[in-house]
Image (spheres, grey):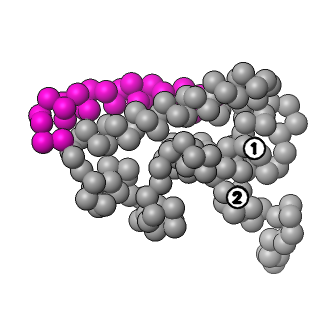
Amino acid sequence: MEHPPPKGPDSSGSEAEQLSAKEKVEQVLSLFGTDETRAVFVQKCRNYIKARDRAIHESYSPQAFIRHRAAYSSPKQAVIHNEIMDTITRISNQAPNVSPQQRKTLIEMHDRDVTADIIRKYLASIGEAPLDDEEENGERKGGMSDTAYYHSLNKGG
């Protein structure tokens, strides 16, 4: 006979999903050893979102050479994203005393698209990346890529 899952703060309910993006990133940042390493990671996140936004915007340019440049700059964006994902993996494997909540957040952030979304919302929460009203209110359609979402808002160049 199966028993229902336990309720309460230690249950496997998705408490990590209830945290804001800012809280999730702050949980991850708290696992870094120094302020300098935290700052480097946050700067990497800024660079990634900036590259991602630029590539999305340029991919809709009426000028072919700009669209072409956007297509070839995405490997740079991928390198930054890979570095972020590698850092998250390393921190989840090497950090001492990871709390159950931090572990849930790190597991959630193993999904590349989820991580990109969390980073964007984190930077917006600290005033460093704009969020559209629909995205801020959680109205982005699930599974929609950044490019498709951007196009749906008629923000192409």
Q: Which residue occupies the foreground of this view, 131 or 148?
A: 131
Q: Secondary structure at mark 1?
A: helix
Residue 39: where, in percent of width, then height?
Answer: 67, 27
Q: Quadrant of the N terminus?
A: bottom right
Q: Which residue occupies the foreground of this view, 97 or 139?
A: 139
Q: Is residue 77 magenta?
A: yes
Residue 104 located left or right of residue 72 = right
* Residue at 45%, 25% in the rendered image: 79
Point out the stretch of residues depicted in magenta.
61-87
- Mark 1 Cα-neighbour bin, 10 Å: few <14, some 14–19, many ≥20: some
Q: Secondary structure at mark 2?
A: loop
Residue 55: where, in percent of width, then height?
Answer: 32, 37
* Residue at 78%, 37% in the rendered image: 30
The residue that mark 1 highlights is 27
Residue 113: where, in percent of width, then height?
Answer: 49, 47
* Residue 152 seen in the figure: yes
The picture quadrant where one finds residue 9 is: bottom right
Say if 70 sits above or below 8 in the image: above
The picture quadrant where one finds residue 41 is: top right
Q: Which mark is residue 19?
A: 2
